[in-house]
Amino acid sequence: MSDEIFKKGYTILDFRNTICITAIQEEIKKVFSSPIELHYQKLLDDQRLNMIKQARDLILEKNLVKKLLLDNIDSLTAFMGLDIDIQSGIYLRVSRPNHESDFIDWHRDTFYGNSQWELNFWFPVFPLEKGAGLMVVEGSHLLPMANVRYVEEKNEFRKQVTKGSLASILGYQYAPKSEDSISDMDLSSVKLLAPKVGQAVFFFGHLIHRAQNCSTKMRVSIDVRVKHMLASTSTKSGYYEPLTRSAMTNCIEKMESIEKGALCGN
């Protein structure tokens, strides 16, 4: 795995335990009776976004994504070590076929506060139809960012996204950016990754990527970020929480807690 992710910027992992994916599907079905057919319903944007948030909140309440990663922790710790943080929120993407407004354009997560130390898990919740998946520019994690700049949003829906809005909370960007590696993109390096249910794309957030759905069904996926507990980040306080800790770290944290209590006179 290490050689592939170093070279390409991503790898595809197989989950050995998929019980939590089944549980995630059931939570989503409580809100969307037929998630992959949602595009046939005539919903206003606010109705659709509120349904996505409701389903996301159900998944978060039961910690299903965190449990999924813990159930399949071996490949993650083999690459990152035992002291791992996970994004406290998740992004549930429910993307209609050929609706550009449902996607985020080409970007790096490092445009928006994440560092090169942070990696993404992206996985489908329901089977992907042909033409749907995650597009990446293979090897672009090794290309330096050049001339990072704000760009004018041309999509009418995304143009209305503001900081703190429901769309922003659900992962839409309110101040889109680009840079020279994107404007000068080598299209031969673009890969459409379409993992099966029970697989995930594990990739550097610094990799240039975007979503795609040119199929005839909804694309339902989840993405979440992870990092080593000591890795730098410019994300806001509370963005991360502990996923797993080594025995050494647990011991040190216990000692520091005792010492802090003693200094406070407890």
Image (spheres, rainbow, N blue to C red):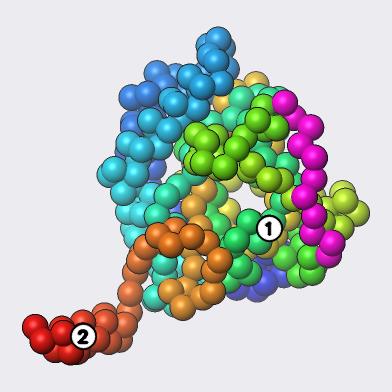
Judge whether 172 appears above or below 86 on screen: above
Q: Residue furthest left?
A: 266
In-front residue for pair 121/193: 121
Question: Would you say the residues marked 1 and 2 are in contact, meaning their CB atoms lie under 8 Å apart?
Answer: no
Whether residue 149 appears in magenta in the rendering, the answer is yes
| Region of the chain picked out in magenta, as a range | 146-156
Q: Which picture quadrant has residue 146?
A: bottom right
On screen, residue 230 versus residue 263, left or right, reads right
Residue at 74 percent of width and 30 percent of height: 155
**Residue bearing mark 1:** 111
On screen, residue 64 versus residue 14, left or right, reads left
Per the picture, the main secondary structure of the magenta-coloured stretch is loop
CA–CA distance in space, label 1 to label 2: 37 Å
Q: Residue furthest front?
A: 264
Judge whether 125 appears above or below 110 on screen: above
**Residue bearing mark 2:** 260
Judge whether 49 appears above or below 137 on screen: above
